[in-house]
Image: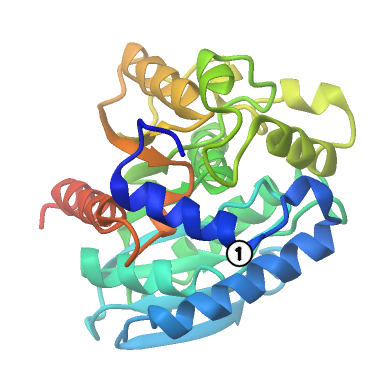
Amino acid sequence: MPDDLTPQMNAFLDKVAEAGIPKLVDLTPQQARDLMEALSAARLRDFPAPDVVYAETFSTGPGYGHVPVRVYKASDADDLPVIIYYHGGGHVIGSLEIYETLCRFLANAAGCAVVSVDYRMGPEHRFPAAAEDSYDALRWVADKAEKLGIDATRIAVSGDSAGGNLAAVVALMAREADGPAVSAQALIYPVVDYRGGTASYDRYGAGYGILEAPTSDWFREHYFANANDMDDWRAAPHLATSHAGLPPALVITAECDVLRDEGVAYAKQLSDAGVAVEHTEYAGVVHGFFGYLGLVDEAEQAHGRVASYLNGIWGR
């Protein structure tokens, strides 16, 4: 195994290798989804989802895209700040169920509400369906805030990988449309440009967990209808004409991740545009570590980092 990973990270990757779990590129999208659901169910037996005060699933309904969402609350206060969370999975895999533990843990860590968004995915619903659903979820949360017991002045957007991409895109969409106010964005190893080509793709493109360079190609092929879509800022947020006026951002990167360099570059791009940015990198871990609660210490540390950052923004 790689010698630049932490002992916990190496131990986890050893177990994955021993289990003979197939690579996503060898599966159809539905087979990949079924595999991830089965692995998530198995994980719940070893690391049960933590209790929260409240959890309920809704559809955003007419006028908001009919997007399935699940609302979690860490307390019964009627004015909680909220994290709208977009799951990872290359815009092809991922679900409310797979992200149940992560969203519950994050709600408790930050003492807030979390709204998990089950946006449409490729190849059945290609770009820009995911971005449209993600923005509709923001509008729904803002408009229904009082009914949900949420403070509409303290809405943050967050997500990991493809979800980090969507959180960044939603922040841009809200600015462009003069839409709901976003107080902060917490971007966890976000996809900023599906075309890759950075040094971290060369360095960590094989042997460092689930996201290898060919896996990114597989996601791209199922998400986009044509190559020109990748030039749209709703697919690649770093291509937006301007990043001025965006909400403050926390960018989290994993050292041993093909997406590491583009996350670092996006943090600088935001900062250069006058956005208040904080960047935290976790050494010796791979893409996906934010969800490896109970397996690597850095997962819980990163949840705590998001929680402390957002509570600072929210004045708590």
The colour scheme of the drawn protein is: rainbow
The location of residue 62, given as percent across then percent down, is 72, 71
Q: Nearer the viewer, residue 37 or 64?
A: 37
Q: How many marks?
A: 1
Mark 1 burial class by Cα count in 10 Å: few <14, some 14-19, many 20+: few
Placement of the C terminus among the 4 image quadrants: bottom left
User: Does residue 48 appear left or right of residue 117 in this picture?
Assistant: left
What amino acid type should be assigned to the residue bearing mark 1? Ala
With respect to residue 153, does 25 lie above or below? above
Q: What residue is disc 1 on?
A: 19
- Image coordinates of residue 60 in percent, x first then y, are 62, 72
Q: Is 111 on the left-hand or right-hand side of 216? A: left
Q: Name the image quarter holding residue 184.
A: top left
Q: Is residue 33 left or right of residue 180?
A: right
**Residue 264 visible:** yes
For the point 45% across and 27% down, which residue is it? 260
Instruction: Work out whether residue 133 or residue 147 is closer to the camera in this orientation and state it.
Output: 133
Q: Residue at x 67, y 32 (%)?
A: 235
Instruction: State the image quarter where residue 187 is shown.
Output: top left
Q: Residue furthest left?
A: 316
Identified at 74% across, 25% down, the residue is 230
Relative to 36, residue 252 above or below: above
Q: Is residue 254 above or below residue 112?
A: above
Q: Position of residue 44 (x, y in %)?
A: 47, 80
Q: Secondary structure at mark 1?
A: helix
Residue 42 vertical position relative to residue 312 in the rendered view, above or below: below
Q: Give how far across and how far down residue 165 sits, in percent.
A: 55, 39
Could you tell me if residue 60 is visible in this image? no
